[in-house]
Image (cartoon, grey):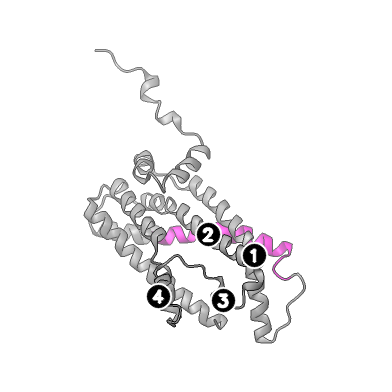
């Protein structure tokens, strides 16, 4: 019996192409999450996918600037403050956006990975912080999709349609199932906005990633993902409600 040729044993390892491989994984993970997580199971990866996601996130934030500027002008007028000419569109604002975008993605990933690590470890999963970072970053394509849909809807409505903070919200959640006459508090509204098909699919991708990378049973993985989903939903709704209160929405 002859030993396999070295080329054959290293074919999988040498198939990795920086940027291209991770870009394709990010593009595929929403449709084939199990296959993508199997590819990174032995060598969890974060920094290159993070860089790709950070670029996409920052680009969308730059596209959203006209709407954010419009909201800022309305808030300034409501508070009786003058709005400087060109506010929100200068070079300083662009530089701040280019720095803040990647940092925002990094901080969110670190917090999410920390929560997932604690819950997974508590339930007996074989996990590390880096593995949970990998799980987290590969759920971001759906977040980017949500932001793109938001930008697309706001663009179709036009900048002039922004009359207050609530006009910046584009929901695909279960709040759309309620009659338009129902008045919701900010916390409850954000809570319902966060429960939709994209968010549920992100929950499923998280569970699949935990199952594969942490070698957890399906029951453990879905428990971890569900607990994390509920915690993230409550935190997001709370921060959203607080933000609305601060801007007078």
Query: Tag 4 or tag 2, which sits nearer the N-term?
Result: 2
Disc 3 target residue: 165
Query: Tag 3 or tag 1, which sits nearer the N-term?
Result: 1
In the picture, measured across the screen, residue 214 lies left or right of residue 105, that is left
Q: Which residues are magenta?
A: 87-112
Residue at position x 41%, y 30% from top?
Answer: 13
Q: Estimate the spatial distance between the alpha carbons at disc 2 and disc 3, rounded to whole Å.
A: 18 Å
- 2 or 4: mark nearer the eye: 4
Return the residue found at the far right. Answer: 85
Residue 189 figure quarter: bottom left
Q: Residues within 10 Å of mark 4 (few under 14, many from 20)?
A: few
Q: Estimate the spatial distance between the alpha carbons at disc 4 and disc 1, rounded to whole Å.
A: 30 Å
Q: Estimate the spatial distance between the alpha carbons at disc 2 and disc 4, rounded to whole Å.
A: 21 Å
Residue at position x 40%, y 72% from top?
Answer: 191
Query: Tag 3 or tag 2, which sits nearer the N-term?
Result: 2
Q: Is residue 198 magenta?
A: no
Residue at position x 46%, y 46% from top?
Answer: 26
Disc 1 target residue: 65
Disc 2 target residue: 149
Disc 4 target residue: 178
Tell me if residue 233 comes above or below residue 215 in the rendering.
Answer: below
Residue 134 % position (x, y): 40, 49
């Amino acid at each position: 019996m002859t030993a396999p040729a070295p080329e054959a044993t290293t074919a999988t390892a040498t198939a990795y192409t920086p940027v291209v491989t991770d870009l394709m994984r990010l593009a595929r993970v929403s449709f084939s999450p199990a296959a993508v997580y199997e590819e990174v199971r032995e060598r969890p990866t974060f920094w290159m996918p993070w860089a790709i996601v950070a670029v996409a996130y920052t680009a969308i934030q730059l596209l959203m600037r006209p709407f954010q500027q419009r909201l800022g002008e309305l808030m300034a007028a409501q508070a009786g403050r003058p709005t400087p000419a060109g506010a929100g569109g200068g070079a300083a604002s662009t530089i701040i956006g280019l720095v803040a975008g990647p940092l925002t993605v990094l901080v969110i990933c670190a917090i999410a990975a920390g929560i997932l690590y604690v819950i997974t470890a508590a339930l007996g999963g074989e996990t590390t912080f880096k593995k949970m970072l990998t799980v987290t970053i590969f759920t971001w394509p759906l977040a980017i999709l949500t932001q793109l849909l938001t930008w697309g809807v706001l663009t179709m409505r036009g900048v002039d349609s922004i009359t207050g903070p609530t006009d910046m919200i584009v929901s695909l959640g279960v709040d759309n199932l309620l009659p338009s006459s129902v008045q919701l508090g900010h916390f409850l509204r954000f809570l319902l906005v966060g429960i939709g098909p994209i968010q549920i699919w992100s929950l499923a991708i998280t569970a699949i990633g935990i199952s594969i990378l942490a070698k957890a049973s399906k029951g453990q993985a879905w428990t971890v993902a569900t607990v994390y989903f509920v915690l993230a939903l409550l935190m997001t709704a709370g921060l959203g409600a607080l933000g609305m209160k601060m801007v007078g929405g």
